[in-house]
Each structure stands twice: as C-alpha cells, then as structure tokens.
Amino acid sequence: MGLSSMKVHQFARGGALWGDDEYSSSGLSLGVCKRLRPLNPKLTTTGAFDLRSFIRPESSPIQLVSPEHKKDSPQVETHPGGTRWNPTQEQIGILEMLYRGGMRTPNAQQIEQITAQLSKYGKIEGKNVFYWFQNHKARERQKQKRNNLGLTHSPRTAPSSTMINSISLKPRGEVVESPYKKCRSWSFESLEKDEEDNKTLELFPLHPEGRSRSS
Amino acid sequence: MGLSSMKVHQFARGGALWGDDEYSSSGLSLGVCKRLRPLNPKLTTTGAFDLRSFIRPESSPIQLVSPEHKKDSPQVETHPGGTRWNPTQEQIGILEMLYRGGMRTPNAQQIEQITAQLSKYGKIEGKNVFYWFQNHKARERQKQKRNNLGLTHSPRTAPSSTMINSISLKPRGEVVESPYKKCRSWSFESLEKDEEDNKTLELFPLHPEGRSRSS
DNA sequence: GCAAATTAATGATTTATTCAAG
DNA sequence: CTTGAATAAATCATTAATTTGC
C-alpha cells in the first residue's frame, strides 16, 4: 500500500504487443522515441545508482544473433531461414513416444538429453523440446476437452480417460510431494564487455524438480 | 530481412510434478502417495533411443543446491534460509523507480545490469528481477482493475491522463513495430558428466525484444 | 514482552491465450 | 490450418506482518 499512484487503465484489447505499453494508456513508452534520452536529469538516484542507464529506449535494433556460434550441429538440415524449428519425422516420433510414455514437463537435464538425441535427426535446441511438450500437452488437453463435451454428459470426468487412446491409464499415483527446495538459479553468462553489444546474453534459470504441495 | 532479431534470453519454466493431468479442481488426492514409481517399463524405443533414460521419475529427492556456489556476494545480507529472494528496501525502491520510469519487461541485458546494481544492496539474481517485473505489472493491473470497477461508471476513461504523475506523456507516434525476428535461443551450459547429478543445470531461453505485430 | 497462530503480501510456477510462420 | 513461440492470467507457496494468549 505504499505505492500505487499509478493509474493505468486498460483497454483489454486482444492485442498483446508490448513494445508499446501493452494496455495502451500511459504514453510512457520505452522504445518509442528512438533515442530520446529521458529528459529527466532529475536523477533521484539512490546512492550511486543511475536510472537513465537502464531505461534506455531499445538502444538499437540489435542484429540477429550471428547464425554460427559455437553450437551448430555438423550435418544438420541447415535450416534456411533459421526462424523456427522445423521438426523432422524422427524427432516428432520420439517426442510423441516420450509423451505417451508419460513425460509431460521434462526438467532441464531431461531436456538436454532429449535435445542431444534429437539433434541427431536434425537441428534442434532445448527450447524447442521444452515448447513442444508445453504445446503438445495443452493441445491434447483441449482436444480431449472437446471430445468430452461432445460425447459425454456425465460429470464423471475421470481424469485421463478418453484421452490419448493408446495409453492404458496408469496408476501412476505419484504426486511426489517431497519437500524439495525449489532452488532455481539463474546465472548470467558473462555479458560482453560492451554494453551495447547484443550478442546472446544468457540468463538462465533452472528449474525445479517438484512442487511441494503441503499447505 | 536480414536484420534485427534480437536475442535475449529469457527464462525457463517448468519442471513440476509430471504426474497427472490438469486442473487440480477435482482435487484428486494430490500429495498423498509419496514416491510411487510410475511402474511403466513399457519401452517402445525407436531404434537406438532409450526411452527409459528420460522418463525416469524424479530420480532422487534432489537436495537443495549447495548454498555456496561461486556466487555469493561479499557482504550481502546472507540470506538465512536462502529459499526465496527477500528484497531489501533499496532494491524495491530502485525497481519501483524503474517501473515508474516505464520499464515493464526488461530484456536480458537490462536484467543483468539491474541485477548487478541491485546486488549491491543484497543478494539477488536475475530471475528475481524478471519475476518482480512480471508480478508487479500483473498486480498493478489487477489493482487498477479493481479500482476502476469500484468507482467509475462513466465509460469516459480518457486514455492516459491520471496516470504516472511525473512523466509527461510523450506523443509517442512511431510505434516502432520493427520486424524483429523472434529468435529465442536457449543454450545448455555444459551438463556435468554425471547424468544423475542434479546440480544446477542451466537451460536458458532468451527473450524477445519487441513483438512484431504485422499481420 | 514473546512466541505460536493467523493473515496479508508477494515471490515463483503453471496454465491458458495469443501471435504469427510455414 | 497447424503449431512453434511468447506473454499474461491464475495459482501455489513461503515469508513478513499482525494478532492473540499467556
């Protein structure tokens, strides 16, 4: 309750772009005036902290990362445009297999292993694996939901029944529930010396293992 | 077309109980059975690919990461339990300042810089900064929504008027909208040699700068 | 005054929705 | 139309405030 004098009202329009201020209002806009310094030399900095160095608007249209980094598989598909992952049949097959096997949200290690395997069949990155599971899970879910609505009225909705036809619903109780520490941890991978340098800067969190569920 | 396409890493999500499906609404006894293996040695492996090595259930109750890594600020608050970030007053102050200055979703570089600054005042990581912005934005939004519902009926809501008192709302023509490529890119930071090793494994995606909105 | 019990804030994840490339 | 990519909303969980009983 200390703050909040902010009064942004939202228009909830469908668009999500955020280069602008997502919910309209607040003409504020970072990244709008291309290089207009925040003419606010007020500097209410706290100690030695300079605000302006952060609010810098977009800097410059950062080039796309140079396609050859250190990681470029030897004989991959080459991916012409290099925009988005285009999975091969083998890759999809394996992923589906894993999914059917019960994998839903692989952790970082698993993702890495999977990626390593799948990269034999074509260019792929960890994020692709990650997103694939996210999307596949979500889409199987909505597909199943549609089906359920279509042909059953009973409020039974036994969790996981109509779904994926080939899986014998396993007992798989196992909600784990061990008192894991969450323990995420991000790190920055050495930002290049030049602050304006827009090469891949890595910032990564890692990700937790289980979610304790005691309350 | 060959230009821009910034490459900033974002964050990884994930990993949780990968047991059953969706909505906890039907409260099917979560957290009851502890440690039941998914007894499903089905293995329909494709070729030389071994499914089981991936579907491994949770492996082992991963300890929390060893509190001393390489990164432990010199004279920070020490963070007793070390579970979740506990921001200091200075940190919050700076973050709010940035927020009021218009920053909403800092990119990796910005996050890194902010983190660097804030770590002077206490232990903090990049993800904390990221999450702070996410949460703060969302909560300001809902707060405002509540307010709007509460006290105005007039559909007037002149866009951008009451808001942020210290910022002269700029004309903001030029909604930029440059055709950046999305270009995320994750990388794995050398997984340790032991596959069972559950030390912090980093997996990081990066995150976009602007969302092109041409359609 | 203080600690256990309760509530309020808010950090951290997950899920749903949206955008856009192919 | 399919689906990879990205974001925002909803949710969970933990810590700090605070209340309460002694």
Image: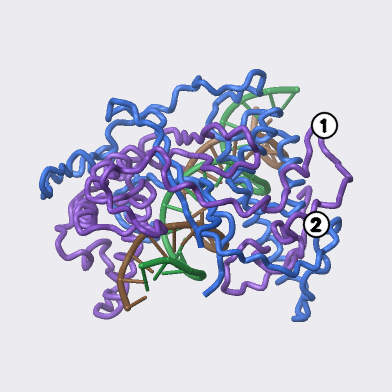
Chain colours: A purple, B blue, C green, D brown
Dot 1: what SS? loop
**Any mark on residue A161, and which?**
none
The chain under label 2 reads A
Identify the residue under disc 1: A47
Q: Is residue B68 visible?
A: yes
Are callouts 1 and 2 both on one chain? yes
Q: Is residue B42 visible?
A: no
Kindly check if marks 1 and 2 are in contact, taking CB atoms under 8 A apart as contact: no
* Amino acid at the residue labelled 2: Ser
Relative to A90, is B91 on the left or the right?
Answer: right
Give the vertical position of B203 relative to A93 (above or below). above
* Amino acid at the residue labelled 1: Gly
Q: What residue is drawn where x is 14% and y is 62%?
A: A166
Q: What residue is drawn where x is 66% and y is 61%?
A: B141
The chain under label 1 reads A
Dot 2: what SS? loop
Separation of disc 1 and disc 2 at Cα? 24 Å
Where is residue A55? Give x, y as percent.
Answer: 73, 48
Relative to A103, is C9 on the left or the right?
Answer: right
Q: Answer with mark 1 or mark 2, whichever residue precedes in sequence.
A: 2
Give the vertical position of B208 relative to A52 (above or below). below
Identify the residue under disc 2: A5
